[in-house]
Amino acid sequence: MKTPPSPPGADRTDGAAVRIGALVPLTRPGWVEAGHHLLAGLELAVREVNAAGGILGRPLELVVRDTAADPQRAAAAVDELARLGVAALAGEYHSVVARAAAARADALGLPFLCSSAVLDALTDRPTQWVARLAPAQSHGWQIYADFLLGAGHRRIAVAAQPSVYWASGARILRDHLAPRGGTVVELDMSALTPAAVCDELVDHRASAVLLLVGHPEPAVPIVKHVRQDPRLAEILIGAPAGQPEFAEWTTLLGEQGAAIPFLRYLPERLGPLGARVGTALRERLGEAPSFVAFEGYDTVTVLAEVLRSNGADRASTAESWPRVAFEGTRGQIRFSRTPGISVWQWAWTPVQVVDRDPAQPDRFRILHTG
């Protein structure tokens, strides 16, 4: 990850640092590329906050912990960061990991602004301590289901691994599609090889198969087998969780990775702030920033605004969620209580269904918006 040097005087602030704990997947089996994008956004925002004078003259400091997609490791990191005296927590990409972190944050009374994880049930009970920027899974995946119906798909297979997140996604799709004439058949990837998936798709006469699996394994092998099977030349491959968002997807799959629709949380056009931040993120990453990088940036900028208004008191930060009204990179951010969601929720960030253009795989095509 390319990080340019700070300009002279960019980090000059006085007093003890205000610390934010950052939970990020930076090693396998975590989705490392997503973690790097998330961290780039978090770090860029910290740099800009400090260049503008920090938090009431005190520097903002990011204390990063690698979750490696491990819920227990994330929970332990929350305990450690709480002992270190962080004012709040930020970040995390994986939903099951964020759920573990949110549970500990709630128990400890530590504010947590979750950047990317979408699982509806981020906590078992309503909590004042946790807020979220990413849309709830039910919101985004229902939009994806509408895209499938609009494209004429009624017989849909999901190649799924055992996970609370994947099971929740399959249930959302089934509940939304069934009343509208769609059917969903689940293919258990703990029992099937990628080659066997192809046979199942033929047997079920599916017109679309959705990848509810990890990346790169087994998502990449499934795509390769389906693309190479002449019986499935017309089938749509979809990836609502966003596996094709990152450059590694094209590196591993080339042209085979194009025309696979996925969810992305960006507006059709970025405003002036988003465009400026996008340019800075591209310089920092050495590649086009994903929506995850924007989520990281918005997370720190929202927390900085709250901390400037209320100081580093944890209870005051948690009490501030319903008063947030902040122009982020992707729109006006406000938190509210949303039915079925146990945390303070931004309802809603822009949602797109996009794919990579077969004629130019580094270019994204917007197929549907919600």
Image (tube, grey):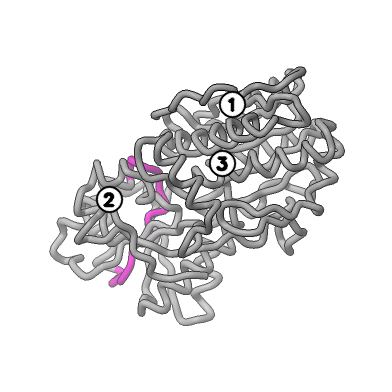
Front one among 231 and 366: 366
Residue drawn 21% across the image and 50% down it = 224
- Give the residue at mark 2: 222
Question: Which residues, given as a range, are shown in magenta?
Answer: 204-218
Q: Residue 110 lies in what quarter of the image?
A: top right
Residue 208 locus on image (x, y percent): 33, 67
Q: Residues within 10 Å of mark 1 (few under 14, many from 20)?
A: some
Q: Nearer the viewer, mark 3 or mark 1?
A: 1
Q: Secondary structure at mark 2?
A: helix
Residue 167: x and y in percent read 52, 54
Residue at 55 percent across and 62 percent down: it is 350
Q: Which residue extends farthest front?
A: 8
Q: Is residue 214 magenta?
A: yes
Binning the other alpha carbons within 10 Å of mark 3 as few (below 14), some (14 to 19) or many (20 upward) gives: many
- Image side of residue 272 versus residue 301, left or right: left
The answer to which of marks 3 and 1 sits earlier in the sequence is 1
Q: Report the residue marked by disc 3.
A: 296
Q: What residue did someone put label 1 on?
A: 10
Residue drawn 48% across the image and 52% down it:
275
**Disc 2 to disc 3, C-alpha distance:** 30 Å
Query: In the visual, does 141 lie left or right of 197?
Result: right
Classify residue 316 by image quadrant: top right
In terms of depth relative to the viewer, which is nearer, 248 or 193? 248
Res 202 visible: yes
- Disc 1, SS: loop
Vertical position of residue 108 compared to residue 193: above or below: above
Could you tell whether 169 is left or right of 257 in the image? right
